[in-house]
Every structure is written in structure tokens, then in C-alpha cells.
Amino acid sequence: MIFERSLQRELAYTAGAVFMVLLTIMLTTMMIRIVGFAASGQVDPRDVLVLIGLTVIGYMAVMLIVTLFVSILFVLTRWYKDSEMVVWLASGVSLTRLIKPIALFTAPIFALIVFFAFIGWPWSNAQSKLIRARFQQRDEVSLLAPGQFRESPTTHRVFFIQSMTADQSHVQNVFVTSTDNGKVSVIVSKTGHTETMKGGDRFVVLENGRRYDGQPGQPDFRIMEFQRYGVKIQSQPVVSVPTASTTSTLGLLRHPTNDNLGELAWRCGLPLIALNLMLLAIPLAYQNPRRGRTINLVMAVLIYLTYSNLLNVVQSQIEQGKMSFAVGLVALHIVVFALVVFIFWIRVRNRPLFTRATFQRASQGS
């Protein structure tokens, strides 16, 4: 039918444009945030692009939901604005006839939302956490940076070097301080290099330097000069403790703790949000041609933010054991669906959501 093909074609164009805008905003925001983490030493600068990509994959379901809701709202609002909707309604096309072509358009996007909610979200979180853990648990030599004081995450050591070769094998003008049982040890040397022993242990070998041992506030410091002094490089295996957000959906089902059930309710809620917002956009798009389209966009933003925040509240209640999983899984979405049906009923009967008398009573009551 011409009506259905026209609607689906315009929905596809609009959805593509909306998604590109959302993706640009997401990439810009994540780049600023993750580059800030790299500048502060929380992540490896070489992993910035990978972390940005993983973050986009993790939030792809949310972006698709917003894309779906806004694109339907934009297209139908324009139809009302340009009186196209009036023509279709006058030719015998009811408001409920919009559900079928919009559902056909939504089907592949809905499949992607399900995939990213149940598979993409935990996988991207697990990979991001693994990259961050690997960087935080790297050995002490990889921490070194010329002209900067660096603290070891595994020992009570602080390193400072003036210069370093590109392969990190030789350094010059080294300063190392460590604390053990209240005693301070300070080591300074002119040069140094790394050596790997037969057993696999790695050492930083310092040359032509001094070592100062003692307790702060006490005069009995011990000073030693050395030609070679070895400092063992401490390292830890990469350990990434799984959390609910990094656990696969099957793992959540196998271990139904409160945290896992809350996370599962949140993941299941994303496709349900997409369905409810898809239906809600149809009656919500009603537009008086004499008014602008800004109010519909504002209402859409407020509705989405309220809906998503309520889903987060439900997740928190389940995690705290204050709400059962079954109630948290369906209660919120049933209430929203009932509201959608009510708004549909009002629009099919061609009645406004708010009358002038409603605003007059509200102003008199205030």
C-alpha cells in the first residue's frame, strides 16, 4: 500500500539521521571522558580508541531505543504539521492502522536492541574492565615516564627518572624511594638498565649511586655507595573480578543473586521499553498545525528519561531485596502499557489529552 511504503521509507531516512546524530554525540562525549582517564593515568593512551568502541557497543541498545522513539515521533509530527495525517485519516485510515507498518519497520531494530542488551552490553563491559585491569596491574617498569613521579600499585615505591630510551631498557638519573615498617629507603643513581634472570625474574639494575636508609625524625641514617644495585620488578597476574554488569545473561540465570536478578531485570526492560515507546509515539505525535513541533520533542525527552530512571530504580530495589524479581520485571512496563492504551483510546476518539478546563481547575487549585 502506498501509505505503508511512504511511512516506512520516511521512517528509515529519519532513523538514519537521528542515529548518526546520537552516535556523534556519544563518540564526542566518550572521547572527552576516556582521554581524560588516559591523561590522569587510569587507562593506557593506546587503548583509548578500543575503549571508545567498546563503550559505544555497550550503549548501542539505548541509542537504538532513542532512535526508534524519536524517529517515529518526528515523522508523524511532520505529517500532522503538513496536514498529511489529516488526509490519511479522512480517507479512512485509522490511527491503529499505523501500528502494522511501524512494527514492520521496528522489527530489525528491535532484534538489534535484544542482541545488544543481552549480549553486547555484558561483553563490552567485560572487555573494558579487562583492559583497565591489565593496565592497572602492569609491572613497575611500564609505569615509568621521564620527568614524572610514579607510584607503584604493588609496592610502597615512588620512581622518578630524568630520561629513558625508547625501549625502556636504559634510564638516567634515577630516584627511588620506598617505605617499609616506618623506615624510609631512598636510592639515587646516575644510570640503570633492566635485566631478566634465568628464573624469569626481572630486575632494574642501578649503577653508580647511593642508598639512604633510616627512620624520619631519627639521626641514625645509614648511607651506602654502590656500583651495581638490583631492584626486583614486582608484577601481578591480571585478575578481573566479575560483576553483574560483566556477567553473561546465561550466567545471571545460573546464579540468581539479588545483584544478578536486578541486572537481568534491567536487560529485559530495554526491549520492553522499546515496544512501549514505539506504541506511545503514535498517539503522542498528534500536532496542532498552528503550533511548533518543539513541545513533542520536549515531552519525548521527559518521557524517556522518566521511564529509564524508573527502570534503574526498579533494578536498585531488586538488588537491595526490597522488590521481587517477578514484580520488578513486569510491573513498571504493564503500567506504562496501560497508559499507552489509554492515550491511544483518547486519540482514537479524537479527544485532547488536556482540555482548557483542566488547566483552569489546576490554576484555581493553586
Image (cartoon, helix red, strand yellow):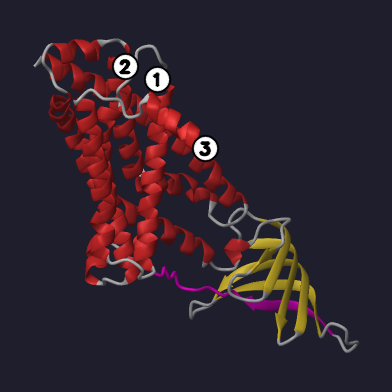
- For label 1, the crowd category at 10 Å Cα-Cα, with few meaning under 14, some 14 to 19 and many 20 or more, is some
Q: Which residue is mark 1?
A: 293
Q: Is residue 188 left or right of residue 49?
A: right
Report x, y in % for residue 74. 33, 23
Q: Going by the image, does 123 lie left or right of 239?
A: left
Q: Nearer the viewer, residue 67 or 330?
A: 330
Q: Looking at the image, do the residues carrying marks 1 and 2 touch, with CB atoms under 8 Å apart?
A: yes
**Placement of the N terminus among the 4 image quadrants:** top left
Task: Label 3: state its secondary structure.
Answer: loop
**As shown in the figure, which amino acid type bears the numbered disc 2?**
Arg
Q: Is 157 contained in the magenta span? A: no
Mark 2: which secondary structure? Answer: helix
Q: Nearer the viewer, mark 2 or mark 3?
A: 3
Q: Earlier in the sequence, mark 2 or mark 3?
A: 2
Res 205 quadrant in image: bottom right
Q: Which mark is residue 366?
A: 3
Q: Residue furthest left?
A: 1
Q: Amino acid at mark 3?
A: Ser
Identify which residue is drawn at 34% across, 16% down.
288
Tell me the residue at 24%/47% (across/down): 272
Q: CA distance from mark 1 to mark 2?
A: 8 Å
> Which residue shows up at 79% across the image and 73% down it?
209
For disc 2, the marked residue is: 78
Give 30 or 358, whichever is nearer the viewer. Answer: 358
Q: Which residues are magenta?
A: 222-242
Amino acid carrying label 1: it is Arg
